[in-house]
Each structure stands twice: as C-alpha cells, then as structure tokens.
Amino acid sequence: MSFSSEVKEELSRQMSNAQHCRIAEIAAITSMCGNVIISWDNKYSIKMRTETLAVARKYANLIKKSFRIKPEISIRTSAYSNKARTYTVNIKNHEESLKILQATKLVNNDGDIEEILSVQNNIVIMKNCCKRAFLRGAFMATGSINDPNKSYHFEIACNNELKAKQILDILNIFNIEGKTVARKGNCVVYIKEGEGIVDVLNVMEAHVALMKMENVRILKGMSNYYNRQVNCEAANIKKTVNTACRQIDDIQYIIDKAGIDYLPGKLQDIAMVRLENPDSSLQELGGLLEPPLGKSGVNHRLRKISEIADDLRGNTQGGLDQ
C-alpha cells in the first residue's frame, strides 16, 4: 500500500461527532469528485466516483450517519486490469439528494447548482473544525502524498482556479503556504516542504501518518548532518594531504637544487621531520622537534621553506633571513 493510500485509509476511519464537520467533509468530497445529475423533470441525484475504496466507504458512512440515508455502492473492474477498480456511490432519490445538496450548500435558493467558494462567506466552513474536515475531504477526493522516504510532495487536484484558491485560503488560515500549478486541465495545489506537509497532516488529523513522516524527517536530518560532517572531514583531510605534498615537494626541490644546508638550522630540522613524517599533522610535527614547537610555529617555518623554494624557482624575490 502506498503512503498516500495509508493516509486515506487512516482518514477514512475518522468520523467526527459534530454534524457540521461531517457536512463540511461531505461538501468537499462531493465538490471535488462528485456529480449532481438533474433529470428532464428536474429530479436530482448524486453520483460520486473514486478509485479508492477508503474514500467510497468514508463518503457512504458520512451520508449514512449525517442524514440517515443509505447510498448504493457499485464496483466496476477495469477491462485492462483486474486490480483497477472504480467505486461509485449513488444517491438516486430526489428528496434525499436535495437534502444533501441543501445542507452542503451546493445548490442555491433557486435550486440551481452553485457553490460558494469564498472561505469567509461559506457557512459550511465557517468554523475552524469544519475547515479541517473540508480539507480532509478534499484530500481524500483528489489528493495524494508521496512516500517521505523518497520525496516530500503533497497535492490536491482542483478542476478550476477558484476551487484551488479556496483550498489555498484554507491552508493559509492554518499558516500553511501552498502553491499552484496547471496540470492536465487541472489547477493543482501542492506543498513540497516537509514542515508544511507535516502541518497539513496535523490539520487533517492524520496523526499516525504525521508520526511516520516525522520519524523519516528526523532520520533524514541525522543522515544529512553526518554526511555534512563526513564531507567536511574529507575536505579537511584532502586539504591537509595537499598541503603536506606541497611542503614535501618544496623541501625536495631545495635539496635537489641547493642541498639541505641551503636552509638555516631551524628550518633544516622541520624540513627533515616533515620528509620523515609525510602523514603527520602540524601539531604532531611540532611534538617531534627538540624542543617541541607549537602548531603556529611549525606552520610559520614551513611557509618560510615554501618562500625559499619559490625564490629558487624564480617566482619571487627574497632571501634566507629569518
């Protein structure tokens, strides 16, 4: 089961005790993936299609608990795959359909299909608890979420820009920043930041999925931290090795061109110690001298040797004065 299916399965088992929250969730699912059918004699019926059993089950249970209406559920198997199924929830009775549509404010006072998309003016989502329920229903209807082990991506596909703005406005009320992108005729609301996805899971009350995602984020954070540490240490080691190789090259060049005696006595000592200990750090080299020398002192003498080697190569002007 995909992570997206796990989240929807978790949300499908939640049933709010408040009638107004259940109506908000029904309104979202009906609006996002439902169809209102009006017959030639002005009789209403509602049909909701989904490829997710958890969504069909939740929608049917919401209607049953909220309106004491038992919808019909039909299942159709794809001709191309026995595993692909489409679940259809039907409310065929006119009075029952009209009752649901009026409660969810999906019809106006004249009986025409009309939805109030303004978050401020829509009585169905006036309360914050109803906004949570509405967002939960919208996600169950047309939403998806990636496995956090692979990437962070949450989205809800809307069939128009006004619906997408409604979803964005609800997210903003909970201080969650979403973005939109056009895709295949839809306007998709999406979140790509891990923190934002955790927040939206919390708003929808998908607490099990939230904990799973937080665990993944913690492990990823630790992994990234240790990767940075390793990379930093590797870079430092590379820098140390390159510096040591350059120092040895300078010393060997001086010996080949002018002999070790070309260097003053103190520089001869550190030169020989460096040649004999190519892998040692500056601090370790200082401990091998008599008397011992600090890291900065070792670094100063090796820089002086480098300057002398450059003088011999003709790159700089200088002498042997200490």
Image: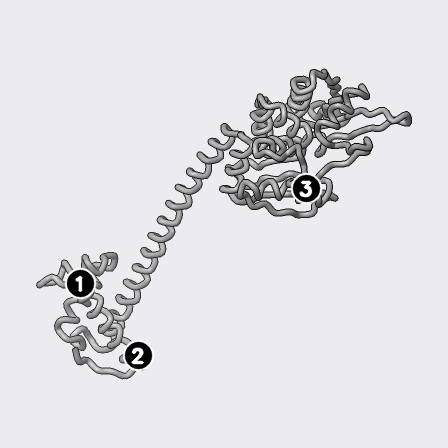
Q: Is residue 222 left or right of residue 187?
A: left
Kind of residue indicated by mark 2: Arg
Classify 121 as above or below 296: above
**Residue 113, position as x, y percentages in the image:** 79, 34
Q: Is residue 151 visible?
A: no
Q: Nearer the viewer, mark 1 or mark 3?
A: 3
Give me the C-alpha separation between circle 1 and circle 3.
79 Å
Marked residue nearer the N-terminal end (2 or 3)? 3
Residues 228 and 235: in front is: 228
Residue 258 appears in view = yes
Q: Residues within 10 Å of mark 3 (few under 14, many from 20)?
A: some
Q: Residue furthest front?
A: 109
Q: Residue at x 58, y 36 (%)?
A: 145
Label 3 sits on a secondary structure element that is loop
- The residue at 77%/23% (across/down) is 97
Residue position marked by numbered label 2 in the rendering:
313
Residue at label 3? 118
Q: Nearer the viewer, residue 148 or 165?
A: 165
Q: Nearer the viewer, residue 146 or 270?
A: 146
Q: Secondary structure at mark 2?
A: helix
- Which is more N-terminal, label 3 or label 1? 3
Residue located at (19% from left, 80% from top): 320
What residue would you read off at disc 1?
273
Give how far across and how far down residue 23 sits, in percent: 66, 27
Who comes first in sequence, dot 1 or dot 2? Answer: 1
Q: Give the SS element for disc 1.
A: helix
